[in-house]
Amino acid sequence: MTFGQLQKRFYFFHILDTFVLWLFNQKELCGYEIIKEFESRSKGYWRPSPALIYPKLLLMASEGLIEETNKGSRGKKYYKITPKGQKKLNEKMENLKRELLQYEDFMREVFEVNR
């Protein structure tokens, strides 16, 4: 696999979608909590904007991957993963694992990085 092929396959939004679905698999969340999870898990290096997260939630809901569960205080919308979303998450996790293994192979071959 060439670097260009690797770069195209291992793109940011693929990871974003997978992580958001994974979070919903853990618990019901609102958009703000997703932003805080990203910020916390990246140790403050990345805080996605609401303009990135909220349209993603609407798209996932329209695709049937998540569903609104209730409205919290001040009209916050909480979502949970659906069976269709669970299936999609499993597919995405398998793809991500495969891509990471290919990335590891690439690093080992090109940069002589060992485990």
Image: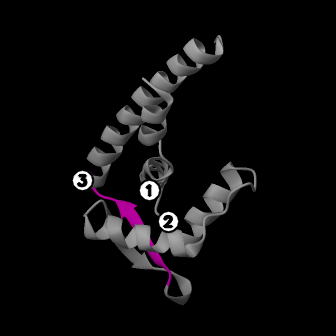
Magenta-drawn segment: 76-83
Q: Nearer the viewer, residue 109 or 98?
A: 109
Quarter of the figure that contains the C terminus:
top right
First along the sequence among labels 3 and 2: 2
Does residue 19 appear to the left or right of 36 in the view shown? left
Of badges 3 and 2, nearer the viewer stands: 3
Are the residues flagged by discs 1 and 3 in contact, CB closer than 8 Å?
A: no
Q: Position of residue 98 (x, y in %)?
A: 40, 27
Q: Which residue is mark 3?
A: 84
Q: Are marks 1 and 2 in contact (CB under 8 Å)?
A: yes
The residue pinned by badge 1 equals 24
Bin the neighbour count of mark 2 within 10 Å (Cα to Cα): few under 14, some 14-19, many 20 and up.
Answer: many
Residue 80 falls left or right of residue 113: left
Residue visible at 34% across and 64% down? 60
Seen in the picture, residue 1 relative to 81 is either above or below; the reply is above
Q: Residue at x 36, y 34 (%)?
A: 95
Residue that mark 2 sits on:
29
Quadrant including the N terminus:
top left
Of the numbered discs 1 and 2, the one sitting upstream in the chain is 1
Q: Secondary structure at mark 2?
A: loop
Q: Secondary structure at mark 3?
A: helix
Is 84 included in the stretch rendered in magenta? Answer: no
Mark pair 1, 2: CA separation: 7 Å
Query: Residue 79 lies in magenta, yes or no?
Result: yes
User: What is the distance, in whole Å, between disc 3 and disc 2 at their CAs?
Assistant: 18 Å
Nearest to the observer: residue 57 or residue 103: 103
Main SS, magenta residues: strand
Determine whether the residue tagged by mark 1 lies in a helix, strand or loop. helix
State whether residue 30 appears in this view. Answer: no
Tell me: 102 left or right of 113: left
Query: Few, some or many C-alpha atoms within 10 Å of disc 3 (few <14, some 14-19, many ≥20)?
Result: few
